[in-house]
Amino acid sequence: MAKSKFEYVRLFEVDDRCLPNTWIVVRVDGKGFHKFSTEHGYEKPNDIKALSLMNRAATSVMEEFKDICLAYGQSDEYSFVFRKETQAYSRRSAKLSTNVCSLFTSAFVYYWKEYFPTIKPRYPPVFDGRTVLYPSNQNIRDYLSWRQADCHINNLYNTTFWALILKGGLTPTEAENKLKGTLSGDKNEILFSQFAINYNTEPEMLRKGTVLVRRKVPVALPNGGTREKSQIVQEHVDIIGDEFWNTNTHLLTFT
Ligand code: GTP
Ligand code: MG
């Protein structure tokens, strides 16, 4: 087919393929979710429905992109880890981040009604997306540890902050001042001594975030037997220590 004289503009599109043999992470993060959560009446400091909707949207992404071996989510963000050797979209960075981000956002809206049946979205939610590469197994583990540590630090702070306001009657400024310079032990102590809250018994989804992995689970057959089927499951476990990785060696093994 004859090419038009305009064809040359294709040359302006740069090659953004990710390096081979590196972990690819696509992270999506809600835009302005401080406002979005307030406008939609999210419970403070954590809204289980909202976090469950995030988990549902992330599951849709993993169902579509089979090369995602693990996803980790907390607050308004989700990280998707592609197998090191994935050839999805020829490893093109923008293709990966835009497709993941777009599907995540549309799934978030698609399933909204199931989690917030009485609240109509007041405006369309937006998520940003980025692709980041991690060359070594240690790097990818440290990346995921960074996100889970962030979850822990923010959740302990927010749990204490909102206990001081909602149960302790402090204003937000008073609560902020009270927490200024405190260490995690101090916050645990405030929760326990003033509000009889043992932080360690708070729901694991809130303290640890959510890990999505594929596991073989038995499913019932019509004839009464069972067979193993790969399913995406949610786990709220520690991914900073070695235990998770020692029991899931396949995740970091190059196949
Ligand atoms: P940008 O990401 O920079 O656009 O800003 P952001 O407002 O989304 O802030 P960021 O991503 O740093 O933090 C997420 C914010 O979402 C939190 O600070 C909370 O205000 C809000 N948020 C996330 N999850 C919950 C929740 O379960 N309950 C409530 N009340 N708020 C939440
Ligand atoms: Mg955000």
Image: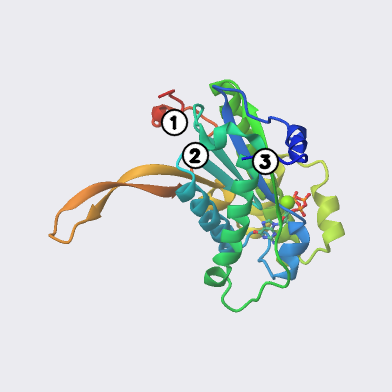
Measured in 3D between alpha carbons, the distance from the residue under mark 1 to the one under mark 3, in whole angstroms, is 22 Å
Which amino acid lies under the numbered mark 1 shown in the image of this protein? Leu
- The secondary structure type at the circle numbered 2 is strand
In the displayed structure image, the side of residue 34 where residue 65 appears, left or right: left
Q: Is residue 200 visible?
A: yes
- The secondary structure type at the circle numbered 1 is helix
Q: Which residue is mark 2?
A: 70
Mark 1 and mark 2 residues within 8 Å of each other at the beta carbon: yes
Instruction: Residue 125 in the image: state x and y as whole percent.
Output: 70, 62
Q: Quadrant of residue 3?
A: top right
Q: What residue is drawn where x is 75% and y is 54%?
A: 31
Out of 51 and 172, give the one closest to the viewer: 51
Q: Which residue is mark 1?
A: 251
Q: Which residue is mark 3?
A: 150
User: Of label 1 and label 3, which has the lower sequence position?
Assistant: 3
Instruction: Residue 249 in the image: state x and y as whole percent.
Output: 40, 27
User: In the picture shown, does residue 229 fall above or below 90?
Assistant: below
1 vs 3, front mark: 1
Which amino acid lies under the numbered mark 3 shown in the image of this protein? Asp
Which amino acid lies under the numbered mark 2 shown in the image of this protein? Leu
In the displayed structure image, the side of residue 5 where residue 144 appears, left or right: left
Measured in 3D between alpha carbons, the distance from the residue under mark 1 to the one under mark 2, in whole angstroms, is 8 Å
Q: What residue is drawn where x is 77% and y is 56%?
A: 32
Q: What residue is drawn where x is 53% and y is 42%?
A: 71
Q: Residue furthest front?
A: 2
Q: Is residue 189 visible?
A: no
User: In the picture shown, does residue 218 fall above or below 12?
Assistant: below
